Image (cartoon, rainbow, N blue to C red):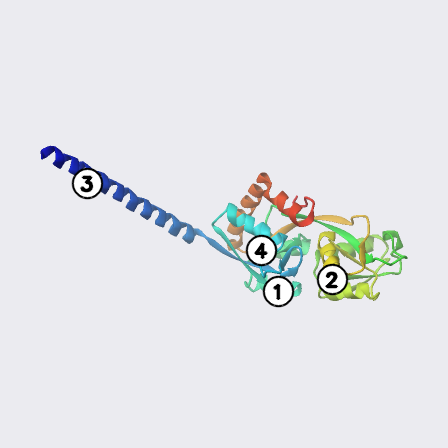
Amino acid sequence: MKIIYIANLRTLYAVALVALIGIVGFIGCSNSQELQSQNTIKVKVGSEGAYKPYSYVDKEGKVTGYDVEVLRILEKIDPTLSFEFNYAPWSALFLGLDSARFDVLANQIVKTPEREERYLFNNQSYFVSTSQFITRADEESINSMEDFKGKIAGCVVGSAHTKILEEWNKTNGNVLEIRYYKDLSPLLQDLVNKRIDVHLNDPTSIVDIIKEQNLKLKILDGRVKESNVYFIFRNEEGSRKIIEKIDAALEKAKETGELRDLSIEFFGINQSQ
């Protein structure tokens, strides 16, 4: 009976030990999850939401696009980052950032001296934008930039491509008359309807619009400029911590090839860096 009693004691001890380890493990896991939740930074992202292929809603109603999916990759790399996507027209994005409706803008934004005076940018770019001229597919009088004299160019107010267009035009003797638009859609319709003659933009965005809307447009050879694309923030202390985390995650995404693969998925080529 004594031997049986000792065996029972050992059994009870083993059961109690397993239970204790389980409780400690549960508490540790719970504390870890709670700590991660407390450390998570919720970031409100501002984007157009109708700027395919960078930011748009697909046929299933899912918010996607290259800029959106870049941030989703960063969330996986750094779980303490949590992005909430909100949308507004281009003309309202910077107003939303200024008023704290957004914490960051992800909308193919490049650095300009005016923006750098007022806002903060992260250090790691996530896309290289190119600027090329677009005209009508059946426009026989325009085959290169040498044919622009006396023609009318349309551009969107506040776009980086607009600044590039203005600088190019000044350098080339102001051969183009420039007209300004608030949004891209009416501009492209005016281009098709011969109210303007050319427009400067990134081909990766225009090609998709041309296909979807069946617009009879063509992209001219020759890049006017290449520009790195960044995320942009309010110039305040809280933004710096987010920038640090985003840059670290972006560097990791480049090292693993995830950013390269995403660019090839959306554009067929690597324009991530």
User: Does residue 125 appear in the picture of this structure?
Assistant: no
Q: Amino acid at mark 1?
A: Ala
Classify mark 3: helix, strand or loop: helix
Q: Is residue 1 left or right of residue 41?
A: left
Looking at marks 1 and 3 on the same chain, the residue that comes earlier in the sequence is marked by 3
Residue 213's disc is 2
Q: Amino acid at mark 4?
A: Phe
In front here: 120 or 16? Answer: 16
Residue at image mark 4: 233
Residue at 66%, 59% in the rendered image: 51
Residue at 55%, 64% in the rendered image: 101
Residue at 85%, 53% in the rendered image: 172
Residue 12's disc is 3
Residue 2's disc is none
Tag in front: 1 or 4:
1
Looking at marks 2 and 4 on the same chain, the residue that comes earlier in the sequence is marked by 2
Query: Extreme right residue here?
Result: 141
Tag in front: 1 or 3:
3
Residue 155, horizontal then vertical, whole percent: 76, 61
Classify mark 2: helix, strand or loop: helix
Q: Quadrant of the N terminus?
A: top left
State if disc 3 and disc 1 touch (CB < 8 Å).
no
Residue at image mark 1: 88
Could you tell me how far apart the alpha carbons at marks 3 and 2 are, in whole angstroms? 74 Å
* Residue 193 drawn above or below residue 10: below
Classify mark 1: helix, strand or loop: loop
Query: Extreme left residue here?
Result: 1
State if disc 4 and disc 1 touch (CB < 8 Å).
no
